[in-house]
Structure formats: C-alpha cells, structure tokens
Image (spheres, rainbow, N blue to C red):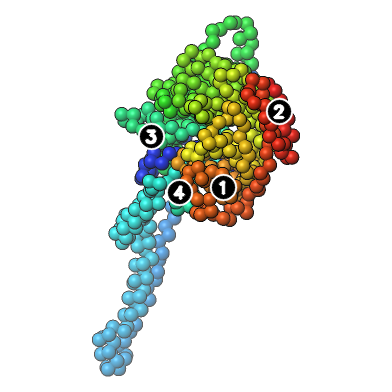
Amino acid sequence: MSVSIVTCSAWVPQGQAKANPEKVEVNVEDLKKIIEETETKLGDLKAEKDDDCDEGDDTDEDNVDEEQIEEVDVKPKVKLEEAMEIEDAPVDEQDIDKLYSFGTYDQEDDNQLNQLLTLKNLSVFGNPADDPLLKDSHDQAREEDELSEVENHRILPDDNLIAVGHVENDAAILEVYVYNEAGNALYVHHDNLLPTVPLCMEWLNYNPFQEELAPGNLVAVGTMEPQIEVWDLDLIDGLEPAYKLGDPRPNKATKKNRRRKKKTNDAPKKVNGHTDAVLCIAWNKEYEHVLASGSADTLIILWDLQEVAVSQVLTCCSGRVQSLQWHPECGSTLASGSAGGEVHIIDCRDGSSKRWQLDGDVEKVLWVKCKNGNYCLLASNDKGLLYSIDPEQEEPVWAITPHEKACTGIQVSSKCPGLLVTAAEDHSIRVWDGGNPMDLISAAPKLVVQLAPQVGKIFSLTAALEHPFVFCIGGDKKDNCFKVWDIRASLKVREVFCPRLGLPVDDDVPDKTRLEQQIETSEDVETRFMSGASGGKSHKKNKQHDGQIRKP
C-alpha cells in the first residue's frame, strides 16, 4: 500500500537563502565515515534488542570461497588472404594493376580489419576526459553542464524556500521547494533523506559553526528519534545535517537495570537530550542562540545552540508536549500545549508557569496580537475546538467548534489585519475574520468561508511570511499531499480582506481553476463565552457542528 503524507513545513524568509547554493561533492573518505557510523548505529540497535531479551545471540560468520578467474586471451586472430597473382595477365592489364594496385586492395582491407580488431584499438576509457579523441569535447560539455546546473539552482531575490517534511512509502524526506508568487512557480529544488518520519520543523538562521556567527539558512527537524537534526538549506546533496542536538540513542533501561533501580536510590543523571520522539520545536527570535523542543517524554528542553548542548529542562507538563511557541515580544515567555489538555505559559527565567486545563489533547498554540497591543493565546484540540486564553484571566475567554475533527493548524496572516485560518483532519480549512484591528479577547472571530484544498486529512498549515493570503497545506492524499494556496481564490475572502490592504476585489484573481476545488459556506459557528469573559453573546449555530462547549 503506497503512502504519501506531508507532516510539517516551514517557510524561509526571502533573502535568507544563498543565490547560488553549494553542491556537496562526496569523496571516498566521507562515504567510509557514513558507512562506519551506520554500522555502529545498527550494532547499538542490535545490542539494545539483545539486552531487552536478556540473551546474547552469537552470529556465525559465513565463509565465502573466492573463485579464481583465469584470464583468457581474447585477441582475435585473422588469417590474411594471399596476394593475387597477376603474372599471367595481359601486358596492358598488368600496367593498369601496377598503376592502381588493384591486386593489393583486398590485402589492405584485411590489414585494416586486423588492426581495428586488436585490443589496443578497442580499449575503453573509464573517464572520457582521458580519451585523447574526446578530451576537448568532453571538457566543453562539462563546462556547459556546470553552467546549466548553476543556473538551474540559482535562487532569485523574490523566491521563497519552503522546507517540507514528506513521507513517501518507506522513505522520509526533507524536501526544499522554491515558490515564486509572481511567476506562479512551485517545484522541488533539492531534498535530503531523513532517518525516520519527520514530525515538526522550524526555520532558524543561527549556525554556531559559521565564521563570525554570520546568519545562516537552516531548519531544525524533529522526528520519531529523540535527536534533533539541523540541516543547512544552502547545501545540495548533503548526506548529513549541519549538527545534531541530543544523544542519538539514549540508554534505555533494561530488565537488569530496572531491578537495580528498585534496590538502589541513584542520583538522577544529567539530561543530555530527549528520550522519545520530538513533537515540536520553537526558535527564539529575540535570543537567537536559544531553541526550545517538546517531546513525547513530557520534557521541554531549552537548547544553547552556541554550545550545542542542553541549557534548561522544564518539567511542568504531565503529558507529551505537542506544541510550543515563544511570545513574539517577550523572549523569556514560552507557551506550551500538551496531551491531557494542559496549556502552560512559562517564564523561562525561573521556570515558573501558569496553567489552564482544556478538553482533549492540545494540538496547537498560537500567540495573537490584539488591539491595544495585548496578546491572547489561541489553543486547538483533538476534538475540533478552538479556545482563546487571556494570560491575565484564570479561565479561557471563549471557545468555538470550528471543525468536526482534530484542529491541527492555526495561522494568522502576517500582513492582513484580522485574517485567521484554521485547518483540521476533516479535510477542510476555515477562514475567519477576527476584526480590524484583531480582537480575539473580547469577541470570537466570525466565519468567512470554508475551503476544501483537496489534500486529504490536513496535518500541516503554515502562513507565508511575505504574502498575506498565501498558505501552504500538507495532507495525506496520495497524488496531491502538498499545496501552496492563495486563498484569494475565494470571492468571499477578497470581499472581506482585500479592501483592508487597498487591493481590488475582482481584479488580479489568482488561478480560477482552483475555484472548482473549494467548498464555501457562510454559516456561523456557535460561540459561547466561558466564565470570567465579558459579554455573553452567542453566534448562530452551524448545522454541521454540535456546538457543545465543555468547560474546563
């Protein structure tokens, strides 16, 4: 059964990528090193399996007899025909034969054939550049290929790179797309193989190994493994990440170790990284050397990228940590959402936190700037609910039911005021109007339109940084699991939001064929304010949803 799923994605700001990315030339030593590391990992995995089974299996080495191959002389032997005798020919014919050498024509052909069939003339050069007959043409063709390759890999000033985590059958791939809005272009620029399924990723420009800490172009990837890989997006055909965070295979407790722990009270060991899958990553744009990661091991780890080591471990979450986001204007404040419905706002200076309890498992958290410069925190869960949390209040302000299944994405437009988009596993995205200016503390957003991007269940939703109406969407549809979508394809979206940016409503409509792929509704979703919230309004109930709000 074939599988094609896009699990996560990250936009790269324009101007951050190199105009001419470098191509990695792999030599024999590099390949040898990678093979040795792979063999070591396989050996560690086998050792862990043997420890768990409390058995030691001896492996027998197979002896393979080498066959000796005798060299065979394959040099062809051609018997030459004897020269034709012309002594008995008439005098005039003899003169003509002597003049034109008719009698030796066959002999010359045989000599030429014998010469061509010798091994010396049939030799093949492993490298065409070593062939004296092809050297000049080969050098010219190689120069043309190199120039063409450089031109194909060139990144234009108005290009956006998009890092995408793609699972195709048994392969886990980090794909780097080029998106150009003006040219309506979208294609895979290059890709890298990942060790296992990618679950999350975050773009960052901090490279501790760069000279004078010059800004880089990297993406941190969390997978089913406990180790975080940081890849350089300016390298093509790279076999390894730029650096890694954490231990590759942390020691798991074996049966013998578990018995020892029950008998002895050993001091807790220093945490060097996660011990389970990494589910979320957040880069601190104010303190650029700080990266936060959340894992299925319930830990939140703050990494010091300068030292490539653990800086702080936060243990406030009781379930697996599924979403993290730094406060946009306060670099010491981190929001987290975890399984079991916990939402925490953490002060990383002392590790203290404030906690809210929601229904279900929290899927995503997102800071949103509202009017008067205040921020609220949006949180979605696996039951399709969306909550608004005011950090100054003890309970959520309001909750709505925008989707029928898990709400896996929340994004706010980077340029258009009030534009909020949610996505879910019910195959749909919904566009909301949060007001102009945005105010999601005193009022819930109004539904503008529901769209069906036709990518199957949606697992990833990311807003473009430079384009106010462009979002990239990842799903599980085999033949169409990734789409970069300009939601102005919807007339309702244009009518509500284009005037806010001074854009025409009817002109410059993007690809009209996309209009055939969407489902539009304008029915409102019921909104009920939680205790402690101002107002008490309630919007009309959507027939597609039950509208039941469960108080925390």
As shown in the figure, which amino acid type bears the numbered disc 1? Glu
Tag of residue 157: none
Q: Quadrant of the N terminus?
A: top right
Q: Which residue is mark 3?
A: 216
As shown in the figure, which amino acid type bears the numbered disc 2? Ile
Please rate how many residues cluster around mark 3, counting C-alpha atoms within 10 Å: few if below 14, some from 14 to 19, many from 20: some
Q: Quadrant of the C terminus?
A: top right
As shown in the figure, which amino acid type bears the numbered disc 3? Gly
Tag of residue 549: 2
Find numbered disc 3 in the image and state the secondary structure of the residue it sits on. loop
Q: Residue at x 49, y 25 (%)?
A: 327
Label 4, label 2: how many angstroms apart (C-alpha)? 42 Å
Q: Which label sits in the foreground, 2 or 1?
A: 1
Q: Which label sits in the foreground, 3 or 2?
A: 2
Label 1, label 3: how many angstroms apart (C-alpha)? 40 Å
Q: Residue at x 36, y 63 (%)?
A: 118
Please rate how many residues cluster around mark 4, counting C-alpha atoms within 10 Å: few if below 14, some from 14 to 19, many from 20: some
Residue at the outermost top position: 264
Question: If you read the primary sequence from the N terminus, does the residue marked by circle 3 or circle 4 appear first?
Answer: 4
Label 3, label 2: how many angstroms apart (C-alpha)? 45 Å
